[in-house]
Image (cartoon, rainbow, N blue to C red):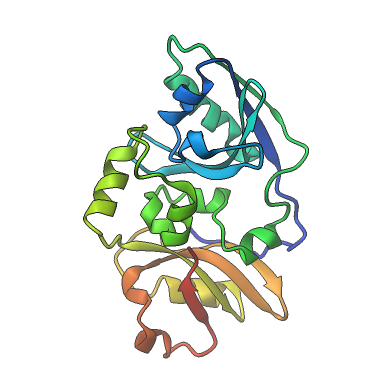
Amino acid sequence: MSATATMESSDALDWSRIRVLGEESESFLQGQLTQDLSIVDEQGRWSLLLRPDSAVLTTCFIQRVAEGFELLVPREVSDVALSRLRRFHLRVKCTLELDDALSGPISTVGELVRATWPGVNEFQAELTPQSYGARIVADTVSFTKGCYTGQELVARLDARAASVPWRFVHASGPSVSIVDEVLRSKGPAGPHGVTTAINEDGRVSCLGFAHRTLLDANYLATFPDVLVGPAG
């Protein structure tokens, strides 16, 4: 999993909208999303949509509308996200509709990297929410609302304060290849390396993954041209 070239900071992010409408829209989504739908209003909140094995399929931005909810998801994964929801859409009094959104909560690749927020490239790692960091878990996951698809492992990791092996990181350095080499320099085979990169102020600013053992200050001090830290 490595970005082979930098992207332009101004490159647009495309979003799609999944409309979940009907009298049972809230109860249906409570069983599918990590966020507590009872606290979602028209201003919106972030959530995660998980695979049954608890790996993150995508983030989504949820807003309450008159007859239910709208979920803004990256367009590249919108069909997969809709298919995932339809898998559990059985004898439920709500409808699911997909169309393109004119805009989304994050507009460009540059905004995504500066916000250190995971996008489509990062979801390909198929990691659990805790791998993306405490900030992202706090913004997207409810541990009090009850069960949802993929919830078991997420709750177990939280209850045991487990230290997940792979960490979502932000890094900067002179080139993508050098940053990628550093991110891959510790740990076993796995989803480490650069996932998204932009040019910024003569350096590259990157999102990616590293093994937890990489985030040792003494070890990172041996790479003075590369800065690495937790992204979430």
Q: Is residue 5 above or below residue 69?
A: below
Total labels: the figure holds 0
Say above or below: 72 vs 97: below
* Residue 11, image x, y percentages: 75, 55
Q: Residue at x 27, y 63 (%)?
A: 163
Q: Quadrant of residue 97?
A: top right
Extreme residue toward the top, this view = 91
Can the viewer see residue 4 in this picture?
A: no
Residue drawn at point x = 40 percent, y = 36 percent: 51
Q: Is residue 51 visible?
A: yes
Observer-nearest of 46 and 187? 46
- Identify the residue at image location x=52%, y=75%: 179
Q: Quadrant of residue 40?
A: top right
- Residue 216, position in %: x, y? 35, 81
Image quadrant of residue 79? top right
59 or 43, which is in the foreground? Answer: 43
User: At which x and y percent is residue 107?
Assistant: 73, 52
Q: Is residue 10 left or right of residue 152?
A: right
Residue in the foreground of this view, choosing between 13 and 178: 13
Is 145 rendered above or below residue 89? below
- Image-based side of 44 in relation to 134, left or right: right
